[in-house]
Amino acid sequence: MKAISVVSPVGKNIALGKKTLEIRKWAPNIGCNEDLLIVENHNYLLKDGNEEMGKAVAIVKVKNVRPFVIR
């Protein structure tokens, strides 16, 4: 199972269904209908090597992965 880290309180909002869209600068290597572990951190992990002991808050089913376009 793949995981994605988010900053608190985003993970809790995803787990509660309040946040249903996540936008990233990079394209994730995950397909539709795949399970994804949501890990919540207290800080942004901005660079390779940044690590923090996060907390698993939810497992979600990915509905769609698509480019985000600003028009």
Image (cartoon, rainbow, N blue to C red):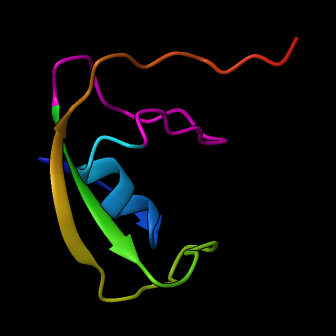
Image-quadrant location for residue 39: bottom left
Is 33 a magenta residue?
yes
Which of these two is toward me, 15 or 41?
15
| Screen quadrant of the C terminus | top right
Report the magenta stretch's main SS: loop
Above or below, 12 against 45 in this view is above
Span highlighted in magenta in the image: 19-34
Query: Residue farthest to the right?
Result: 71
Above or below, 37 against 8 in this view is above
Image-quadrant location for residue 5: bottom left
Which of these two is toward me, 44 or 57?
57
Q: How far from the left and from the top, in percent, is residue 7?
A: 49, 70
Which of these two is toward me, 41 or 49?
41
Left or right for 64, reference 67: left
Q: How far from the left and from the top, in percent, is residue 66?
A: 51, 15
Is 39 a magenta residue?
no
